[in-house]
Image: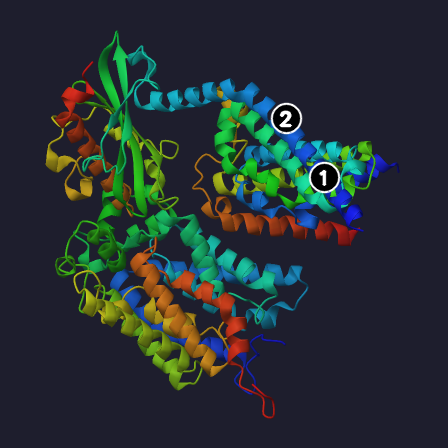
Amino acid sequence: MFKDHFKKISITATSMIIFSFIASTALSISYFITKSPIDESDAKAKKIFLNQVISANLYDNDLVKDTISAEPSQLLGNKKNIEIYRAKIKNKVVAVIIESIAPDGYSGEIKTLVGIDHENKVLGVRVINHKETPGLGDYIEIEKSKWIKNFDNTSLEKITENHWAVKKDGGEFDYTTGATITPRAVIKSTYKTLLYAKENKQRLFAL
Amino acid sequence: MNSIQKIALDGFWKQNPGVVQLLGLCPTLAITTSVINGLSLGIATAIVMALSNGSVSPIRKFIPIEIRVPVFVLIIASLVTIIDFSIHAFIQPLYKALGIFIPLIVTNCIVLARVESFAAKNETTPSFFDGLFMGLGLAMVLTLLGGLRELFGKGTLFSGIDLVFGPSANNLVIHFFGDYHGFLLAILPPGAFIGLACLIALKNRIETNQ
Amino acid sequence: MNNRSPYIVNAPSVSTIMFKVLLALIPGIALYVYAYGFGVLVNIFLASLTVLLTESTILSIRKLPIKPFIFDGSGLVTAWLLALSIPSIAPWWIIVLGTLLCIIFGKHLYGGLGYNLFNPAMVGYAILLISFPAFMTHWQAPIFLIDGHFAWIDQIKIIFNSQLISKETVDAISSATPLDYIKTQLTLDQPLSRIKQDKIFGFFGGQSLEMINFGYLVGGLYLLKEKIVSWHLPVAFLLTLFLIGLIFNIYQPDTFASPLFQIMSGGSILCAFFIITDPVSAPTTPKGKIYFGIAIALLVFIIRIFGGYPEGIAFAVLFMNICVPLIDSLTQPRVFGHKQ
């Protein structure tokens, strides 16, 4: 009686072990085959995204790997260390890409990437993710509208502090009627990112 | 009618997973915001189903009955992970668009349901075709629903085709209206429920008329 | 057990009731026209026309007699409520599409009048709000707040082809609603007392809007007097909204508006007397009606203050509509002789 039982359990356990072994072998093989293509395609995708902020002909280094770390800062709104990408020509930093968080969107945080060159000029801004109302506040996405391109070539010198605002508040920037909170948040965070870049210029653009 | 034909008819029409069995509704509803999304996930699911049915059937006699479900899940999960790796490695933009829904094929009941109810009892060839046609039947529904939602929601068809075939395919996107405001409801989750309901109603209507 | 709302028994026919409901809306509509011009009438006309065409088409497809169903007036009530809920300067296709959706998805797919689970007008409104938020949150300013000359023809132009008039004119005649304005300004860290200095605010609620709400209130009281709506729903709804508004207002007067503001702005009054009182989609038991009204008021308040949209009535009503069968079965009076 007990012997039969034991035999049955052993067979079940052994077959489960065999199946697990086969499955994990198959998984390991496919993992090793696909590992380097996955890394490559991830890096490529990241590069394509970063190139929207700083166009590819402005630098000659491997942007994705050339990063420095930034401490939490009031101006960037980050609570953890974040990476700042540095674009270089012949080993001289020409521009940086900073991730910035606008805490005051209509429904939660709006994360953006801001590209800033060594003259404190904005090269481009792109939204990474947000939770704004679909059809109303989501025109900050480049797929939905060209609005985000309004930031191209702006700088602290060109636009004075009071004019970093939507037109409704007496500023320089367009907005869509019915959705002013979203652009306000993005404008404010871009402005603060520029301030951050100015204050930390030594560090960001050091070799 | 030979058995393969019957299996195909079951998969595409009589026992269609999307509109008759109503199994695997999570991806059906969540991912079908465009033709390309629906079709891609449908094909990925069909591949998983064909392979899992095809691999369970030949070894079905070696699987102790008590642990058949863990073994089935193990096989399905491995297959899904391999497909997930491959899409991530070779079609990165699509991987980003489908996101979590590729790994989630594991939890799609239709896959386990076909393995348990068909592959565990039948020979390898019919099992393989059962998985394939059931998967393609689901893919058909996903594509139709994706098309419906995309057409009403964005006024286009095949948007996002560049995710699969690269940027050069962008001119294959069909725009139906010049100035379309976008009927957002169709793209948002409620649109998926309404769209699926319409498809089910349509199928029932065709059946009652026959 | 069958929890469906009963057809009104031993009572005036459906068409008499619906006619009286339409009549009760007239004071509100008249004040609306006085304060905002003719846009709303255009919308009401378009909605009524769409209802008649859609209903006769669907009824003939369903092979039902057309005449009695069309003249019961319930479709017209739905159409008018939807027309009063959307901005009066929304493009014409908004109201046409909305009414179409109300009638098809809100009413006939469920089997027609008496079988609909959801309030048809709110189904249409919610679909429109989710699908076209830009048009649905673009409201007209009251006429006497508009700077410069305002011709009624501009309103017609905006509705039928907004490209005919300049962007400046559009900007000049549009304005945020008080609920939306408060929400927006609060994010700029302004105290409520300063926000309410703006010209769009009146005594209790929004400038002119409170007047229209007063018109709806008169109509609602008429419906109460005629015993077409029972007091449970409006009283439970308004009282709850008032109380929760009061609690928050006392707690933080610089963030939360006064309870009277909650009642006199947005669609509160219209909701209390005309929307949640829809005999088909509301509970049938008196106790159930009270719970229903309380729950909707709480949801409305939560969505207004914390939600992603400025006004939450449609979502609150639809959500509670789902709960109606449950409410009905839980509040069914105990049949004599049966144990609890």
Q: Position of residue C190 (x, y in %)?
A: 15, 53
> Mark 2 — residue?
A26
Amino acid type at image mark 2: Ala
- Mark 1 chain: B
Quarter of the view holding residue C143: bottom left
Q: Position of residue B210 (x, y in %)?
A: 80, 50
Residue that appears at 54% across and 66% down: C117
Quarter of the view holding residue C162: top left
Residue that appears at 62% across and 63% down: C59
Quarter of the view holding residue C315: bottom left
Query: Going by the image, does C173 lie left or right of B164?
Result: left
Query: Going by the image, does C129 lie left or right of A189?
Result: right
Label 2, secondary structure: give it.
helix
Q: Position of residue C97 (x, y in %)?
A: 48, 53
Q: How is the image coloured?
A: rainbow
Q: Which mark is residue B134?
A: 1
Q: Quadrant of the C terminus of chain A?
A: top left
